[in-house]
Structure formats: structure tokens, C-alpha cells
Image: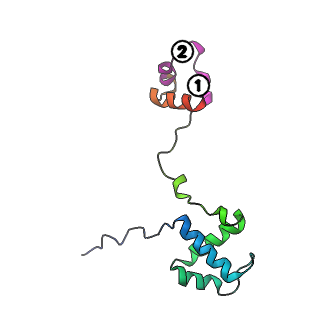
């Protein structure tokens, strides 16, 4: 049985901010004033921009609620990278004051690495 290696690949294309702004400009040029889209405008932009109807609709709704062309941004950069470990303030207060004089003691009390505690301390100050 032959299985295509690309069959399960996520084919969703990531559009740049410039592409999204061009799509929005096409929508404005064909619709005229801002408001409800006229009949057939969405489909004509989908054909010309060669992207999905969902994508064009999402761009229109984002700009309508966000305040125009300045609301178009790339949200992908906000979702990447390692997730931050939160520093529990209550756990820090549970360590007796005499046992939290050094970063090493605080790290041992919080069950975190010294470098993580140091990075959190540097962010605060």
C-alpha cells in the first residue's frame, strides 16, 4: 500500500502582512465605503487573490473590528517559542526568609533551576 508522504501535511498557507493589506485594498476598492460587503465582492477577491474564502473573510472582519489597515498584523510570531514558566509568588512567600537569601536557596525552595530564577529576577528589575 502506497502512502503519500505529503498527504497529512498541513497545507495552510501563511500570508504576509503585505499580502493581507493587498487583499484588504482589493476589498475596499470593490466595495467602496466600509460597511457590509456588497454581493459578489468576496468571491471576486478570492478569485483574484488566489486564496481561500475563509482567509479573505477573516481579513475583512479583523479590519472591521480592529480599526482599518493598521489592525492587520502577523499573529504567528506571538505563538512561537518556548512557553514561559510562571513564578508562583505564594510558593516564594512560603519559603522562610532565612532560607531565601541566595538564588540557590530560592531555586531549591521553588524546585526550579538557578538560571530560571535568575532570569525571572532580572525581568523584574
User: Quadrant of the image for the N terminus?
Assistant: bottom left
**Label 2: which secondary element:** helix
Residue 74 is labelled as none
Residue most toward the top? 98
Between 39 and 27, the one nearer to me in the picture: 27
User: Vertically, is 115 above or below 76?
Assistant: above
Residue 66 picture location, percent across and down: 70, 63
Between 24 and 86, the one nearer to me in the picture: 24
**Residue 93 lies in magenta, yes or no?**
yes
Residue density around tag 1, few if under 14, some if 14–19, many if 20 or more, within 10 Å: some
User: Quadrant of the image for the C terminus?
Assistant: top right
User: Vertically, is 18 above or below 48?
Assistant: above
Residue 71 picture location, percent across and down: 66, 62
User: Vertically, is 22 above or below 100?
Assistant: below
Q: Which residues lie in the magenta part?
A: 89-108
* Residue annotated with mark 2: 99
Residue 45 picture location, percent across and down: 59, 81
Residue in the image at 52% along x and 41% along y: 84
Spatial CA distance of label 1 from label 2 is 11 Å
Between 81 and 47, the one nearer to me in the picture: 47
* Residue annotated with mark 1: 92
Q: Quadrant of residue 97?
A: top right
Tag 1 and tag 2, C-beta contact below 8 Å: no
Amino acid at each position: 500500500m502506497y502512502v503519500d508522504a505529503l498527504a497529512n501535511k498541513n497545507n495552510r498557507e501563511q500570508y504576509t502582512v503585505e499580502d493581507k493589506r493587498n487583499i484588504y485594498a482589493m476589498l475596499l476598492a470593490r466595495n467602496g465605503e466600509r460597511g457590509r460587503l456588497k454581493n459578489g465582492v468576496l468571491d471576486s477577491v478570492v478569485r483574484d487573490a488566489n486564496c481561500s474564502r475563509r482567509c479573505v473573510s477573516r481579513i475583512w472582519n479583523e479590519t472591521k473590528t480592529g480599526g482599518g489597515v493598521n489592525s492587520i498584523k502577523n499573529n504567528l510570531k506571538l505563538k512561537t517559542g518556548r512557553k514561559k514558566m510562571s513564578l508562583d509568588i505564594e510558593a516564594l512567600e512560603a519559603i522562610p526568609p532565612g532560607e531565601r537569601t541566595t538564588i540557590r536557596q530560592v531555586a531549591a525552595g521553588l524546585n526550579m533551576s538557578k538560571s530560571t530564577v535568575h532570569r525571572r529576577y532580572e525581568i523584574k528589575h
